[in-house]
């Protein structure tokens, strides 16, 4: 099964693809079963991939633009309160951590253009999911911002909602479940394709993460007396 759907597809766009793959014409009712299947697929994939570790997303900063949507370059929503650290790239191998906090006095320097040195959030209305990322000072050119954040299960039931995990996996699982629900002959093939994709994604997660045993600690030096005097040893 070949899926070319990018992560940034919305719930409505993925539902349209799902209906076609399950051989339901767009004019045949609302297909409430598929709506439930797509939402459940989103929750299932999240549960399979979320292991409590932060993920790293990127946001490309543009010159003369101080605020950005709470969505990564590849369409991953960054949930309110989930950010652990932010890093800005300078040069090909250098990154600097940005502290959180922008004061009104700093914002008053609206004409300042330079490498961002701080970040903060701005919320719009009463919806906690709608917020923007602000950097200070305003970038003088394009920069890559690395965002370490916790993956959070977001709403995925309204037309404009974006998946908080890889949309290709969500769609693949939904297609398998949809085909099984409607008793289609290739349901098992679709299910095996999803299992392969999920396995490959889990391998990628492990390859990109360093595991540190809970008992790990940095070696410490101490001074001990010996027959020849004192010397430094490391625990």
Image: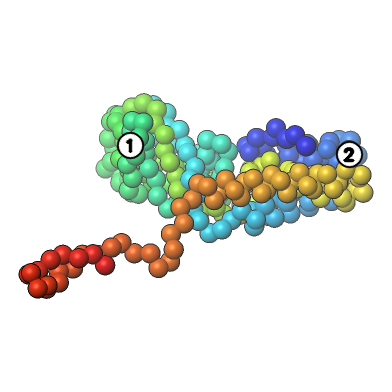
Colour scheme of the picture: rainbow
Residue at position x 62%, y 46% in the image = 201
Name the spot of residue 182 as percent of width and height, x first.
91, 48
Q: Could you tell whether 176 is left or right of 101 in the image?
A: right
Residue at position x 86%, y 41% in the image = 22
Which mark lies nearer to you, 2 or 1?
Answer: 1
Mark 2 nearby-residue class (10 Å; few <14, some 14–19, many ≥20): some
Residue at position x 61%, y 53% in the image = 49
Q: Could you tell whether 62 is left or right of 186 in the image?
A: left
Quadrant containing the C terminus in the rendered view:
bottom left
Farthest residue in the front direction? 227
Residue at position x 33%, y 27% in the image = 140
Q: Secondary structure at mark 1?
A: strand
Q: Nearer the viewer, residue 199 or 63?
A: 199
Q: Nearer the viewer, residue 193 or 182?
A: 193
Q: Is residue 141 visible?
A: yes
The residue that disc 2 covers is 24
Q: Could you tell whether 187 is left or right of 94 in the image?
A: right
The residue that disc 1 covers is 94
Tell me how far mark 2 sits from mark 1, CA to CA.
Answer: 51 Å
């Amino acid at each position: 099964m070949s899926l070319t759907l990018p992560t940034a597809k919305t719930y409505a766009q993925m539902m349209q693809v799902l209906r076609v793959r399950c051989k339901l014409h767009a004019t045949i009712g609302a297909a409430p079963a598929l709506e439930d299947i797509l939402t459940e697929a989103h929750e299932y994939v999240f549960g399979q991939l979320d292991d409590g570790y932060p993920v790293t997303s990127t946001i490309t900063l543009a010159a003369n633009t101080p605020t950005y949507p709470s969505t990564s370059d590849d369409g991953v929503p960054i949930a309110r309160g989930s950010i652990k650290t932010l890093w800005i790239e300078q040069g090909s191998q250098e990154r600097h951590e940005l502290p959180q906090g922008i004061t009104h006095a700093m914002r008053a320097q609206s004409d300042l253009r330079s490498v961002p040195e701080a970040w903060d959030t701005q919320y719009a209305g009463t919806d906690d999911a709608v917020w923007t990322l602000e950097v200070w000072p305003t970038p003088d050119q394009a920069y890559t911002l690395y965002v370490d954040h916790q993956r959070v299960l977001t709403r995925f039931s309204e037309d404009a909602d974006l998946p908080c995990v890889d949309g290709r996996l969500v769609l693949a699982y939904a297609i398998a479940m949809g085909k099984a629900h409607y008793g289609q002959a290739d349901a098992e093939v679709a299910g095996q394709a999803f299992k392969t994709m999920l396995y490959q994604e889990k391998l990628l997660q492990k390859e990109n993460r360093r595991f540190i045993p809970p008992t790990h600690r940095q070696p410490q030096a101490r001074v001990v007396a010996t027959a020849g005097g004192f010397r430094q040893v490391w625990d």
